[in-house]
Image: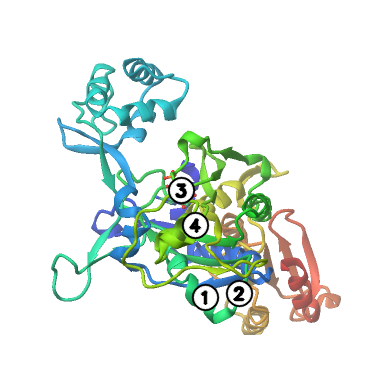
Amino acid sequence: MEELVSLCKRRGFIFQGSEIYGGLQGFYDYGPLGVELKNNIKAAWWRSNVYERDDMEGLDSSIIMHRLVLRHSGHEATFSDPMVDNKKNNKRYRLDHLVKDQKADVVARVAAEMGADPANFPAVVAALNASPARASEALKAAGVRDPFSGEVGDWTEPKPFNMMFKTTIGPVADEDSYGYLRPETAQGIFTNFKNVVDSTSRRLPFGIAQIGKAFRNEITPRNFIFRVRELEQMEIEFFCTPGTDEDWHQHWLDKRLAWWEAQGVPREKIEILDVPAEDLAHYSKRTYDLMYDYPTLGHEEIEGIANRSDYDLGSHTKAQAELGLVASVTENNDSIAKLTIPHPETNKPVVPFVIEPSAGVDRALLAVLSEAFTRETLENGSERIVLKLRPHLAPIKVAVIPLARNREEITAVARAIKAELQGLGLGRVLYEDSGNIGKAYRRHDEVGTPYCVTVDFDTVGKGEDPSLTDTVTIRDRDTLAQERVKISELSGWIREKLR
Ligand code: ATP
């Protein structure tokens, strides 16, 4: 992981946010190559989930939302993580992270103090949450250390901490003039359900897909871009008739695993966690968490696929009492819309069930990079770092390299090839004359460019072999094979390989 983080900075994938002022924890900026990789991941997701299906619509809803949206969604009351403070230095930690970071014998002592099974970590955290006063004593008695100072801390009782960012809207900051930065993109989909149905005449089943930023004031952002405060999500809310929800849940589990595989994140590196009933959010009928085996971190959630029953639309609809909702929702006297759709068989209005596959873009990017990162020893004994990214994800598709940067006949051909290949619309094609050819190849291996095209003296008829006139060399990132191809056939060759 450390090597990957250093490559990300060195080659311009990811930088610390606000770095020149000392950095801002939990915020990252995507550099010249990072933005390309991120866009390619999002495009692959959109292609697979919107363009290649006929039962999906897209959406781009606003980031700042009415406080009532986040009240009725349940986020005001429950979108919180338990935190504890160390009274010795006023540092604040997320309770589960704090305990997880302790040595095994300390965790075992905490478990013993709380009467919980030390092998069942969620049970230990649940026990701490259930009795805050005892928890404070248990953390002290077990000798839980402060990760910052390394010393045993003087711990407060765990308290819930709401993770939403609040902001003032308009010039007057009074009691009611605030809104929230959305903590997930999903709520914009639910609040637009009626708009999308009315404007597209959709019938069940169908879905709405959205990619966008979400904001969570994480107590302990960490592990590079794995846990950040400004994140991006790729979310689908798939609406279906109650009773068909379990089949659709399975459908989305299969689809999403296949998609990860196509991005170079293999099936065997993802564990499916069928979240135990006692750990489910109250609205969830069943949830599969996809746990990717991140280097250093181990299995951590990359995507959640939840069956959310009729909770969301049921929470945001008016006239809740007459709709026979299955989920238990809090009363809503604010909404002005009835969020129903005709049942496909009976035509009676029904509040659909929702299957929600929700993936993080940043966590996807980290997984894709982790899988692609390769250190290889070549036949001649030298080492190279190469990013074996799937070509559709590579930030630069082709680098066009003139062998001599101040020979007009060579650079003119190289520039013409760059323009032609760029016109194929496959993504970024780079004209690259920044150094010697060996260095250029090494750099492009490190950033995952699948092909380097070299224009040399033979290309322009000034080499030793006249039969090579109007041909270029293509170097393959993975095999290192070099092939001579006619310029007239180059576009077709590249298009075929990068399809
Ligand atoms: P965790 O348990 O790791 O905090 P979560 O269960 O809160 O995650 P969800 O609310 O299910 O996450 O969000 C859906 C997806 O959004 C996650 O699977 C993850 O990919 C991404 N995500 C959530 N929180 C963050 C974060 N702080 N930084 C980066 N990605 C995140």
Residue sitting at x 47%, y 67%: 189
Q: Which of marks 3 and 4 is nearer the N terminus?
A: 3
- Residue 231: x and y in percent read 41, 57
Which residue does the numbered mark 3 point to in the structure image? 283
Q: What element carries label 3?
A: loop
Which residue does the numbered mark 2 point to in the structure image? 202
Per the model, the C-alpha gap separating discs 4 and 2 is 22 Å
Q: Earlier in the sequence, mark 2 or mark 3?
A: 2
Q: How many labels does the image show?
A: 4
Residue sitting at x 22%, y 26%: 133
Which residue does the numbered mark 4 point to in the structure image? 324
Which residue does the numbered mark 1 point to in the structure image? 196
Per the model, the C-alpha gap separating discs 3 and 1 is 24 Å
Quadrant in which residue 182 is drawn: bottom left
Classify mark 2: residues with Cα within 10 Å, few (<14), some (14-19) or many (20+): some
Classify mark 4: residues with Cα within 10 Å, few (<14), some (14-19) or many (20+): few
Q: Earlier in the sequence, mark 2 or mark 1?
A: 1
Q: Earlier in the sequence, mark 4 or mark 1?
A: 1
Q: Is mark 4 on a helix, strand or loop?
A: loop
**Which circle, 4 or 2, is nearer the viewer?**
4
The colour scheme used here is rainbow
Residue flagged by tag 3: what amino acid is it? Tyr
Camera sees residue 176: yes
Per the model, the C-alpha gap separating discs 2 and 1 is 8 Å
Classify mark 1: residues with Cα within 10 Å, few (<14), some (14-19) or many (20+): some
Residues marked 4 and 1 touching at CB (< 8 Å): no
